[in-house]
Amino acid sequence: MRKLGETLWQRAERYARIHKAAYEKWDNGEIANVRLDNAGVLCIRYENGKWYHYSETDGELFWW
């Protein structure tokens, strides 16, 4: 759930921590860029150039 007063960057860091914890080996590097797409979905570009979109529903985080 989005925390009150949480900045976009703070939310991206939180999402990245959850995403990284789901993998034994993380090859994407650290956060390089954060933005909202036209639909308001948080997008993170990692150091390897890959972009992921994140959606949080009922306390569950989804990425694609």
Image: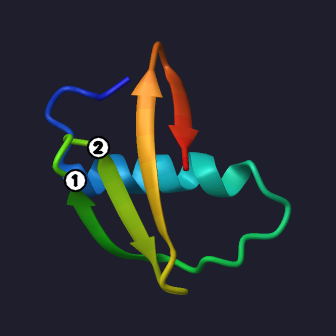
Q: Is mark 1 on a helix, strand or loop?
A: loop
**Residue that sits furthest to the bottom in the current view:** 48
Residues under numbered marks 1 and 2 in contact, where contact means CB atoms less than 8 Å apart:
yes
Circle on res. 37? 1
Q: Which amino acid does label 1 sit on?
A: Asp
- The x, y position of residue 4, in whole percent, is 18, 26
Task: Say whether residue 60 is left or right of residue 21.
Answer: left
Relative to residue 18, is residue 25 depicted above or below?
A: below
In this view of the protein, which residue sits in the foreground, 38 or 52?
38
Residue depicted at 34% across the width and 57% down the height: 43
Q: How crowded is mark 1: few (under 14 residues within 10 Å), some or many (20 or more)?
A: few
> Which percent across, then down, holds residue 21?
70, 51
Quadrant (top left/top right/bottom left/bottom right) for the N terminus: top left
Instruction: Check the image and report above or below for 7 versus 61.
Output: below
Q: Is mark 2 on a helix, strand or loop?
A: loop
Residue 14 image point, x, y percent: 44, 47
Give the amino acid at mark 2: Val
Q: Outermost residue toward the top? A: 58
| Cα–Cα gap, marks 1 and 2 | 5 Å
**Residue that sits furthest to the front in the current view:** 38
The foreground one among 39 and 57 is 39
Q: Which residue is drawn at 29% across and 43% down?
A: 41
Compared with residue 58, is residue 45 higher up or lower down, i.e. above or below?
below
Please name the colour scheme applied to the rendered image. rainbow
Q: How many neighbours does mark 2 have within 10 angstroms: few (below 14), some (14-19), or many (20 or more)?
A: few
Up/down of 26 relative to 10, above or below: below
Residue 12 is tagged as none
What residue does disc 2 label?
A: 41
